[in-house]
Image (spheres, rainbow, N blue to C red):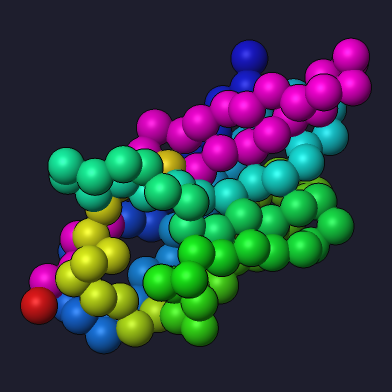
């Protein structure tokens, strides 16, 4: 059973920084993409950032230049460094991992979510 455990959320003032971590366990399979989504109250879940096993990254336009995603493939851990936070970054952040299956596809697993609140 694959499990994703997140940490690092909290309350911060606008302009501040937070670092989220998400560790995957319970699998010996390769993990393709890992990344972060977020969901604010009353809004749809949106992709924040993703990183492939090879290190290619993808960011939402509204976080480019402020957030940095990275991963440690040995630890199966993905990080999200968030700088220059804005009140509109307030949301529950969910990490995900696309784990290879023996059939050649992937199965996506999700973390439980961590709250990030940015005060103005």
Magenta: main secondary structure equals strand
Q: Is residue 11 left or right of residue 75?
A: left
State whether residue 30 appears in this view.
yes
Is residue 98 located in the magenta-colored stretch of the structure? yes
Place residue 57 in its image quadrant: bottom right
The N terminus lies in quadrant = top right
113 versus 117 height, above or below? above
The C terminus lies in quadrant = bottom left
Which residue is situated farthest in the left direction here? 120
Place residue 114 in its image quadrant: top left
Where is residue 61 drawn, in percent x and y? Answer: 48, 71
Where is residue 80 drawn, in percent x and y? Answer: 51, 63
Residue name at image x 89 percent, y 15 percent: 102
Q: Is residue 78 left or right of residue 52?
A: left
Where is residue 81 drawn, in percent x and y? Answer: 49, 70
Residue name at image x 36 percent, y 42 percent: 45
120 versus 36 height, above or below? below
Segment colored magenta: 95-119
Is residue 39 located in the magenta-colored stretch of the structure? no
Residue name at image x 25 percent, y 76 percent: 86
Place residue 101 in its image quadrant: top right
Residue name at image x 56 percent, y 72 percent: 68
Where is residue 7 drawn, in percent x and y? Answer: 41, 49
């Amino acid at each position: 059973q694959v499990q994703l455990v997140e940490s690092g959320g909290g309350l911060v003032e606008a302009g501040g920084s937070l670092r989220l971590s998400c560790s995957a366990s319970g699998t010996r399979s390769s993990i393709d993409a890992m990344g972060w989504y977020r969901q604010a109250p009353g809004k749809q879940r949106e992709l924040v950032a993703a990183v492939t096993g090879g290190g290619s990254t993808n960011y939402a336009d509204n976080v480019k230049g402020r957030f940095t995603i990275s991963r440690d493939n040995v630890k199966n851990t993905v990080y999200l460094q968030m700088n220059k936070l804005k009140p509109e970054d307030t949301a529950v952040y969910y990490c995900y991992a696309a784990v290879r299956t023996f059939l050649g596809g992937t199965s996506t697993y999700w973390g439980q979510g961590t709250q990030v609140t940015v005060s103005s």
